[in-house]
Image: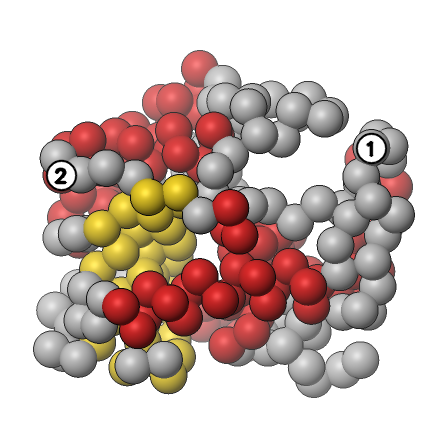
Amino acid sequence: MSGGPFSGATGAAAASHHAGADASGPRPTETRLYFVRHAHSAYEHGRELERGLSAAGEAEARAICRRLEREGIERFVSSPYRRAIDTIRPLADAAGQDIELHADLRERLVSGERDLGPEGFLEAKRRCYAEPDYRPPGGESSREAAARAVSVVRGLLREHPGRRIAIGTHGDILTLMLGTFDPGFGYDFWQSLSMPDAYCARFAGERFLGAERIGYGCGEK
């Protein structure tokens, strides 16, 4: 399938996604969602739910949260995976807020019970983006994963218009969520993400206005 919500980013589109975030305040009806990909976590097959951040990841999480403190974020939601929660926890703690967990924001499973290894994992990932309805053994298709995560996003937009909300997330499901609104977010974008990473997506109602990367320094990739 070409040109759909899961196609790869073009050079121009990818460049626009990585532009700096607009420092001006949002219009009264504009909702801002801050998608925060988790910081470094040592991979352990089969321990998706409970594996946390590495020591380096904890330092990176503090750095990106210090940057995001300037954004006036009011609500905090996350994937139930520990590494996503722990990445935005310093930000939620600084704001004196709890983190609301949504199971449908979990990472998309590609490899199932079998460890595919680095090359096999990338090949499965490429196919998932090229064929949105392809479901790897024991995993989810791109279309299935995007649908359940975007349902959470649309709910947040309806329930909290004009607010600023941080979402603790993962590289693949982040790409699929943004790709639903803009086909420029695809496999190439996923490969370009760092750990951690942050994108501010702006909406008027449920209409997508654009997304910009937020740089945070401190050895960011």
Q: Secondary structure at mark 2?
A: helix
The residue indicated by pointer 1 is 113
Q: Is residue 84 above or below residue 181?
A: above
Q: Is residue 169 visible?
A: no
Which residue type does callout 1 highlight? Glu
Q: Position of residue 214 (x, y in %)?
A: 33, 54
Q: Residue shown at 23%/46% (left/top)?
A: 68
Q: Between 173 and 118, which is closer to the camera in this rendering?
A: 173
Q: Residue shown at 37%/83% (left/top)?
A: 207
Q: Is residue 120 visible?
A: yes
Q: Secondary structure at mark 1?
A: loop
Q: Residue shown at 44%/15% (left/top)?
A: 55
The residue indicated by pointer 2 is 95
Q: Quadrant of the N terminus?
A: bottom right
Q: Position of residue 141 (x, y in %)?
A: 75, 60
Q: Between 51 and 124, which is closer to the camera in this rendering?
A: 51
Q: Position of residue 15 (x, y in %)?
A: 49, 68
Quarter of the figure with residue 165: bottom left
**Label 2: how many residues lie within 10 Å, few (<14), some (14-19) or many (20+)?**
some
Which mark is nearer the camera, 1 or 2?
1
Residues at marks 1 and 2, CA–CA distance in whole angstroms: 38 Å
Which residue type does callout 2 highlight? Ala
**Label 1: how many residues lie within 10 Å, few (<14), some (14-19) or many (20+)?**
few
- 105 left or right of 137 in image: left
Which comes sooner in the sequence, label 1 or label 2? 2
Q: Residue shown at 37%/67% (left/top)?
A: 155
Q: Are marks 1 and 2 in contact (CB under 8 Å)?
A: no
